[in-house]
Amino acid sequence: MFRCDFALIPCQPTGVDLRSAADAIKLVKQAQSVRQGPPAAAVFLARAVKGTRLKDEAIALLSKSNVPICTAVIHQRQVVADTFGQGATAWGMPGKPATEAAGEFETLFNEVLGMLP
């Protein structure tokens, strides 16, 4: 945190992960205080399940942190878990779930690019 320009904090919509994200945000704030500026930071939600209250509650809770929350969300998909065993990425896997996953990663990438200092 003391050497980077940007910190991207992933967070799953679970109590443990929300607590860990809060700890990471505290570290960012400490580094910003010491450095009197950088790093910029953002949080993104990963492994979220579409249409769940837990996802919405996690976004609401993270929004209170004074750190930008990415609008792009990476949803839970088996194809993403399968990429490791296949030695591939979502872009290299067949099927609609892979295409959707790749689209979410691209959306997140482009959003983060727009936040870089």
Image (spheres, rainbow, N blue to C red):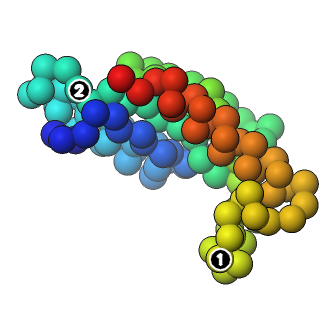
- Look at the image and tell me in which quarter the C terminus lies: top left
Q: Is residue 69 visible?
A: no
The kind of residue tagged 2 is Pro
Q: Secondary structure at mark 2?
A: loop
Q: Is residue 11 visible?
A: yes
Above or below: residue 112 compared with residue 106 = above
Q: Residues within 10 Å of mark 2 (few under 14, many from 20)?
A: many
Give the mark count. 2
Rounded to the nearest angstrom, the CA distance separating label 2 from label 1 is 36 Å
Q: Indicate left or right for 114 with 19 as reference.
A: right
Q: Which of the 4 quarters of the picture holds residue 74?
A: top right
- First in sequence: mark 2 vs mark 1: 2
Q: Which residue is mark 1?
A: 87
Q: Indicate left or right for 6 with 71 as reference.
A: left
- Which residue is found at the position 23% from the left and 26% from the top? 38
Residue 117 - label: none
Q: Indicate left or right for 86 with 3 as reference.
A: right
- Which residue is found at the position 25% from the left and 39% from the top? 4
Looking at this rendering, what residue extends furthest in the bottom direction?
A: 85
- Which residue is found at the position 61% from the left and 37% from the top? 108
Residue 103, given in percent of the width and then of the height, sits at 75, 43
Q: Which residue is mark 2?
A: 38
